[in-house]
Image (tube, rainbow, N blue to C red):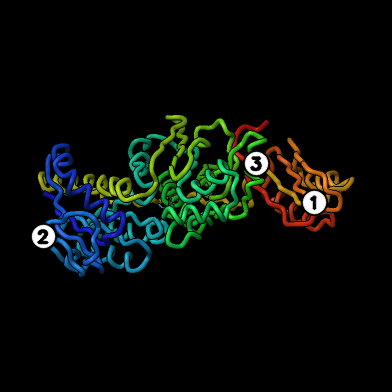
Amino acid sequence: MINVGIIGFGTVGTGTAKILLENKSVISERIGFDINLKKIADLDIKKSRGIKLPEGILTANADEILNDPEINIVIELIGGIHPAKELILKAIRNKKHVVTANKALIATEGNEILAEAEKHGVEVGFEASVAGGIPIIKIMKEGLVANRIMAVYGIINGTSNYILTKMTDEGIEFSDALKEAQRLGYAEADPTYDIEGIDSAHKLAILASLAYNIPFSFNDVYKEGITRITSQDIGFAGELGYKIKLLAIAKASDGKVELRVHPTMVPKDYLISKVDGVFNAIYVQGDAVGDTLYYGRGAGDMPTGSAVVSDIVDIGKKIVRSQESGVRSKEAVQIPRSKLKVKGIEDIEAMYYFRFTAFDKPGVLSSISGVLGSYNISITSVIQKGRSLGEAVPLIVLTHTAKEKDVIKAVAEIDRLSVVADKTLYIRVEGKEE
Ligand code: HSE
């Protein structure tokens, strides 16, 4: 029997406890031993969580779990950096294995945590930190272990995907769609994390670490959110045959790796474009396997709890195996050791959608395209609608593959033209070049 203790009895803690209690016999039958939920610690042990717990299981003191010699695995589900980090380090130093759903913590402090775990010969499971119920960590670590990973494209923030879907389907603006997401309880406590790409960047740092064996590199991820996208952009993208998605991209590129989160125009007929609402999806391209796609719920008590329990079972199996054989598993933690460098955003290449805001008068298109041409940016399509002499109108331009470096310079120059009335917005475009 494996004893576990949960620290943090919020949404995911409750889902995990429910699964451990209600699916206990199903799990035991599958794995051949019992997982016993011995303790749950939370500062608030009065609040009803809608779940019937065995007598005496709750405690307000996390040390009752951390110092319990019978507890094999500590499950950290409080979220945030502090005191989650200190609790995890204490568990590790007490030679307890750890399971966590804490994406922000793993993305930013994961290197230190894994090094400590290696030192003490314990495991750290973080399946639940990325894309909730989709077992993507296991897929990267095990299912696709034979592959060189060419690219990972993820819709890994349900809130921003919900907002973009609402804007696409109902033609509403960003702020109204955000309010709806908050009303439904999808957004993080601080929605900035969702809408500015930070939550996706946390998860991407974790996925990239597994895909490219690099340390968790949250600070090196380029982050751009969805707050500047208007329903007009979504409309124009639609006319051009694309959908706008907040994509998290990790890509092998000239001996480096690109790590970026930004709104992306994706051809409407790509499977990932069809992932709508709060659902998550991750497309992984491996050199041996080719294209693969994983889809499911990225948040919520039960999907995330399902991922937490899968880590508990994995670690539990190793504990039982080593108890039976008397040999401790050697690969307790896999420390990512590749020295592969991350490519700066200014060094990437992509196709681009530009929304210029320009006065509708003769010669404007040629001034703008002249600047683009001088930076080697070649145009594939132009849309300009509505005629309002003397007023600024959107001018949409789609390009062939160009260098981001050139795009940055061209936009700075175009924004200084007297015929341009507002800052230019640009969106990177994925798909086959026309
Ligand atoms: N706020 C996150 C999301 C929750 O919207 O996907 C799951 O990490």
Q: Nearer the viewer, residue 348 or 173?
A: 173
Report, in whole angstroms, how far the alpha carbon at label 3 lies from the one at label 2.
57 Å
Which quadrant of the view contains residue 48? bottom left
Residue type marked 3:
Gly
User: Residue beneath label 3, please?
Assistant: 235
Q: Nearer the viewer, residue 189 or 345?
A: 189
Which quadrant of the view contains residue 377? top right
Residue 254 visible to the viewer: no
User: Residue beneath label 1, please?
Assistant: 358
Q: Residue at x 50, y 45 (%)?
A: 250
Where residue 330 sits: x, y (%)?
23, 48
Residue 247 visible to the viewer: yes
Residue type marked 2:
Glu
Report, in whole angstroms, how far the alpha carbon at label 1 lies from the one at label 3.
18 Å
Q: Residue furthest right?
A: 362
Sequence-wise, the earlier of marks 3 and 2 is: 2
User: Residue beneath label 2, please?
Assistant: 55
Where residue 122 sits: x, y (%)?
24, 55
Q: Residue at x 57, y 42 (%)?
A: 168
Q: Nearer the viewer, residue 278 or 212?
A: 278
Task: Mark 2 and mark 1 in contact? Answer it, CB < 8 Å.
Answer: no
Element type where label 3 sits in the image: helix
Element type where label 1 sits in the image: strand
Element type where label 2 sits in the image: loop
Residue type marked 1:
Ala
Q: Nearer the viewer, residue 346 or 71?
A: 71
Placement of the C terminus among the 4 image quadrants? top right
